[in-house]
Amino acid sequence: MELNTQTRQALGKKNKKLREERQIPAVIFAKGMDSLPLTVDLMQFGKVYKAAGTTTLVDLKVGDKSEKVLIKDVQYDPISLKPIHASFHKVNLKEKITAEIPVNIVGEENNELIKNGSALVLQLLNEISVEALPTDLPHEIVVDVSSLNDFERGITVAELKLDRSKVEIMGTEPDELVVKLGSAQMAEEPVEEVPVSEEEALAKITATEELSEEEKAARAAKEAEEKGKDKDKKD
C-alpha cells in the first residue's frame, strides 16, 4: 500500500490554502529524528487510510525515498468531518511496538439465536492492545459469533485466533470476555426514569467528596436562596 507525499514549506495559517487545493498538511516522525512537514492528497489519503487504518504498514513516498510508516493522529474538521492533518510514524521494522487493534465481530447472520430474535451480540472489548513487530501487527482481530448458542458463555481473550508466537496480547486477562450473547427481550424492556430534584441531587454528594469551586458556589447560592425565602416568610 503506497501513499505519495511532498515536503511542505507552508506552516500555520498558510495551511488553509493547501486544504483549499484538496491537500492536507501532514508530518512524519520517528524516534531519534526531527519531524518533517509534508503534504498529501486528500482523496488518496482517504482511500489508503480506509484500507490501512492505524495498524497496517504503508509505504510513504517522500520525494525519491520510501519509508515504512503507520498512520497516526488523524485530525478532522468538526463540521465537514474531513481529515485536516495526519501524522505518520516511521517504524523500526526490527523493534516491537504496541498498538490498539480493532475487534471485528462476524457471523451474526449465521447465529440461530440472533436470527430468530432471541439474542443480540454484546461486544465488551472494541480494541485489544498487542505487542509485535510492525510487520506482524494484525490489521484487525476477527471474532466469529456464529457458534455461540447459549447465554452462559462468550468468547474470551484466550480464544482469539492470533499467532501467539508473533503477537503478544497486553493488558487483558486470558479469561476476559471479548463478546457474549445478551437477551433481546431484556434489551427491549423500557427503563423508567425517575426525576431527581436539585435538592436530592445535592444530597447525594457525600461528605467525603471534595467539591469543585463551581459546586461550592452553587451550594452556597442555593443555601442563601433558601435562607432568603425563610426570612421573607417570617417578615
Image: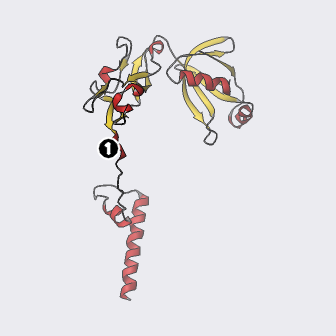
Image coordinates of residue 65 in percent, x first then y, are 65, 11
Determine the image quadrant of residue 3: top right
- Check the image and report above or below for 71 versus 221: above
Q: Nearer the viewer, residue 36 or 20?
A: 20
Q: Secondary structure under badge 1? A: helix
As drawn, 49 above or below 225: above
Residue 212 vs 61, above or below: the answer is: below
Q: Residue 41: in sight, yes or no?
A: no
Question: Please, what is the three-letter code of the amino acid marked with disc 1?
Answer: Met
Tell me where residue 42 appears, x and y as whole percent. 67, 27
Query: Residue at label 1?
Result: 186
At x 49% / y 21%, what residue is drawn?
55
The N terminus - image quarter: top right
Q: Is residue 223 left or right of residue 72?
A: left
Residue at the spot 38% in from the left edge and 31% down from the top edge: 115
The answer to whether one can see residue 73 in this image is yes
- Point out residue 8 in the picture as x, y percentages from the top left corner: 70, 25
Q: Residue at x 31, y 63 (%)?
A: 203
Residues packed near mark 1 inside 10 Å, few (<14), some (14 to 19) or many (20 plus): few
Judged left or right of residue 56, residue 2 is right
**Who is closer to the viewer here, 161 or 128?**
161
Up/down of 226 relative to 127, above or below: below
